[in-house]
Amino acid sequence: MPRYEYHCDANGRTLEVEHGMSEKLKTWGELAERTGEPIGDTRASEPIERLISLSFAKTASGSSGAGGGGCGPGCGCHPH
């Protein structure tokens, strides 16, 4: 599963979270809940911005991505 960094302008914090490619977190409350971080003084409704996909988590077989060969044809991580 890919890992993403999200940034909250309201509190200046950037947190890393793992989730499916089709999912996108939208608020500080969602991010704090997913990462287990305390919400603190920041309103749960504050918007967050997804910065970058960091990596794919290793599967039990030790390969990353779908079938161990990257995401699939046409993807930059697919071996040639």
Image (cartoon, rainbow, N blue to C red):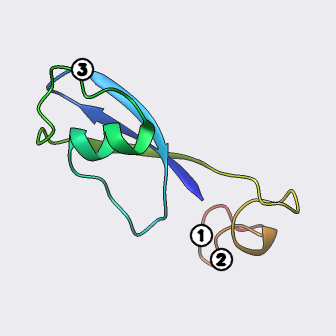
Report the residue at 12% width, 38% height from top: 46
Residue 76 point in image, percent of width and height? 61, 63
Q: Which mark is residue 75?
A: 1
Tag 2 near tag 3, CB within 8 Å: no
Query: Split into 4 quadrants, where in the image is the N terminus?
Result: bottom right
Q: Is residue 4 left or right of residue 47?
A: right
Label 1 amino acid?
Cys
Which residue is denoted by mark 3 in the rendering? 12
Q: Is residue 26 left or right of residue 45?
A: right
Which residue is denoted by mark 2 in the rendering? 72
Residue 10 point in image, percent of width and height? 14, 25
Report the residue at 65% width, 77% height from top: 72
Residue 74 point in image, percent of width and height? 59, 76
Dividing the picture into quadrants, the one containing residue 13 is top left
Report the residue at 23% width, 38% height from top: 28
Secondary structure beneath label 3: loop
Label 2 amino acid?
Gly
Task: Compare residues 35 and 57 and report the one nearer the observer.
Answer: 35
Which residue extends farthest bottom?
Answer: 73
Q: CA distance from mark 1 to mark 2?
A: 6 Å
Report the residue at 36% width, 28% height from top: 14
Residue 11 point in image, percent of width and height? 20, 21
**In the depicted structure, whether residue 52 falls above or below residue 22:** above
Q: CA distance from mark 1 to mark 3?
A: 32 Å
Tag 1 near tag 2, CB within 8 Å: yes
